[in-house]
Image: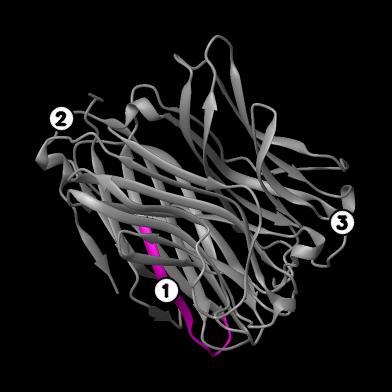
Amino acid sequence: MATALEFYKANTVTPANFTGGYATYLSCVADRSALAGTKNFFIIAHIATTVNNIDTTGKVRLQVDGVDYGECADGLYHEQSDLPSGYTYNFVKRLSLDNSSHTITLDCGRVLGANNFQAQNASIVILEESANAQYNDSTTETGTGAATGWVDYLTLSFTPGATENYLIVASCETKSEDESDSGVKGIQLDVVGTVVLTENHGELGHATNDRTYRTVGMACFKELASGASRTIKLQMQGNGAIDEVYCRKGAIIAIPFSDFENVYTDSQAGKTFHTGTSFSDTDVVLSNQAVNAADHLVIAAAECSNESPIVIGYWQLVSAGTNFVVHQFRDRDEDTDEYYLEFAVHGVTLTSGNQDFEIEGNSSSTSESGEGCVRNAYLIVAEIPPAPAIGRRIFITHV
């Protein structure tokens, strides 16, 4: 049996509008006041935002006990008329939490415009760092400089104790110097020399300036062999000194499946196209998956685009009856190999029996010329080894 882990969670799919400065959309409280000692915890979070009309800018931040640990998209511009239009932000952090109560929040605010900046769903998961988990991060801003090839931004190297599958989760905040559609490439996740997930075309076509940060989130599962050091990398690519890509606040987590109680997975590398305005097609499925009565970490990731930049392709995580829609801007075009890259996470207490988990694609257009596209999709459902009841108290608030 895997070693017990503390686990705290909060989620909501209730929309809320923001018309001024920062206000909290979702809170998660890790009350450790009755527990002994300080421990390291992973914080994994997503928040999906949209606008109800055009010409609005917004911003998002992650706070822990009132301190900023991630802030981005101050000025990310929503200008297209196709709806739903928006962006999904991802945060991955590791923090030491002492034996007191700690509050983690996802906050939103409107920067410019007269329309509502809306949060539509969000999740925060706080997972105790297991004994065999691996982690690396960097808060320093790093640019690609004059390079035109892929440049290492953040590297996690370790020797696995045994050959087995690992849950890999990563995020960073990124920006580029080029608002046009020329040159700038993007971000990718390399696992032991194999590119697993890629966001090509890193320009911010909907930014009010060329120094606007946004997030890129990635999640997958991969087998790592023992016997030698294995390397996981976040890489970035620009197009020379005038079209640099920058990254900051990056993090990579790798957790062996054996540190969980049970793990269920599915994936799909190939492209699936979606025409229509409802989530009627399924890409990745764990249907009628038999699970135990326990806390579970559910995480999904995909590359998402569309065949025409005048429409929007998007996807959602369906997790035991809760749907988390992952929103996109309009300016990506699958025909030129441009994709958005993000994850959706869900912490949930499941009852024993069969549960459904899916990744589903969609499109804002019913035209075949504007089909949405999902590829390189990953779905992981991990049962958390149970900790003492007092270490699993859950507090959920949202506006």
The location of residue 332, given as percent across then percent down, is 72, 67
| Residue that mark 2 sits on | 36
Residue picked out by circle 1: 120
Disc 1 from disc 2: Cα separation = 37 Å
The answer to whether the residue labelled 1 contacts the one labelled 2, judged by CB atoms less than 8 Å apart, is no
Q: Amino acid at mark 3?
A: Gly
Q: Is residue 65 visible?
A: no
Q: Nearer the viewer, mark 2 or mark 3?
A: 3
Residue 183 image label: 3
Label 1 vs label 3: CA separation?
A: 33 Å
The label on residue 274 is none
Disc 2 to disc 3: CB gap under 8 Å: no
Main secondary structure type of the part rendered in magenta: strand
Q: In screen coordinates, is 58 left or right of 102?
A: right
Point out the stretch of residues depicted in magenta.
Answer: 112-123
Specify whether 193 is left or right of 262.
Answer: right
